[in-house]
Image (cartoon, rainbow, N blue to C red):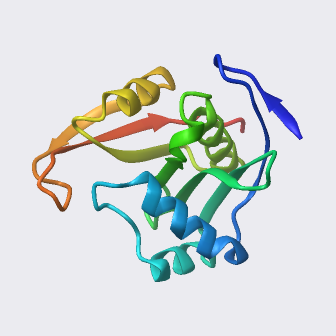
Amino acid sequence: MQAINHYSKAFKGLMRPLILSDLNELWQLDLRVFLDGEVYERETFRFLLTNPKVIARQIRSEYDEMAAFGIAQIEDTGQGHITAIGVAPEYRRRGLARLLLHEIERSLVARGISSIKLEVRANNDAAQQLYEQLGYITTQRMGKYYSNGDDGYSMVKLLETFD
């Protein structure tokens, strides 16, 4: 178990790959995280977890429960795309999303990917602040991007590659 002490509430857990046998737990956590209706179908997760162009990681708590997950896909254009970052409500504000993003970015660089993009709700100030701290830049506001009519932002980041 690795102690993660970035914030006031210490967290003990470990990061590991997210695999097909985690599908049901992943789907249940996704339902808890995204209460606004932007959840993935179970079959979408099945597709992502079996796709070789996907990087999927989870952080498990000391009680062996999934505390957070992150999924990115390498698009046909050669760009990375964060498709989901989710942290269980009881584990938020402990730096878990930041750790997942760092690991996903590192994994993309290891595969030769030099840029990454993501979408975030226009009203999700906390997530936007995290992404900006990590070097993401807002490139576009997308009107009514989400199914409930909320606007979104497209954000991108150039990744440091070591040739």
For this orientation, the residue located farthest to the bottom is 43
Residue at 65%, 16% (x, y): give it. Answer: 8
Q: Position of residue 94 (x, y in %)?
A: 62, 28
The foreground one among 114 and 43 is 43
* Quarter that holds the N terminus: top right
| Quarter occupied by the C terminus | top right
105 vs 77, left or right, is: right
Residue found at the far top of this picture: 8
The quarter holding residue 127 reads top left
Q: Residue at x 71, y 35 (%)?
A: 162
The image shows residue 147, relative to residue 163, as above or below, that is below
Residue 30 picture location, percent across and down? 48, 61
Which quadrant of the figure has residue 10?
Answer: top right
Q: Nearer the viewer, residue 47 or 113?
A: 47
Image label count: 0
Q: Residue furthest right?
A: 1
Observer able to see residue 52: no
Image position of 153 (left or right of 67): left
Relative to 143, is 20 above or below? below
Residue 112 percent location from the top left of the image? 65, 51
Q: Is residue 134 visible?
A: yes
Q: Position of residue 106 (x, y in %)?
A: 68, 42
Task: Name the residue at 38% across, 54% down.
Answer: 34
Q: Is residue 65 left or right of residue 118?
A: right
Q: Is residue 46 left or right of residue 137?
A: right
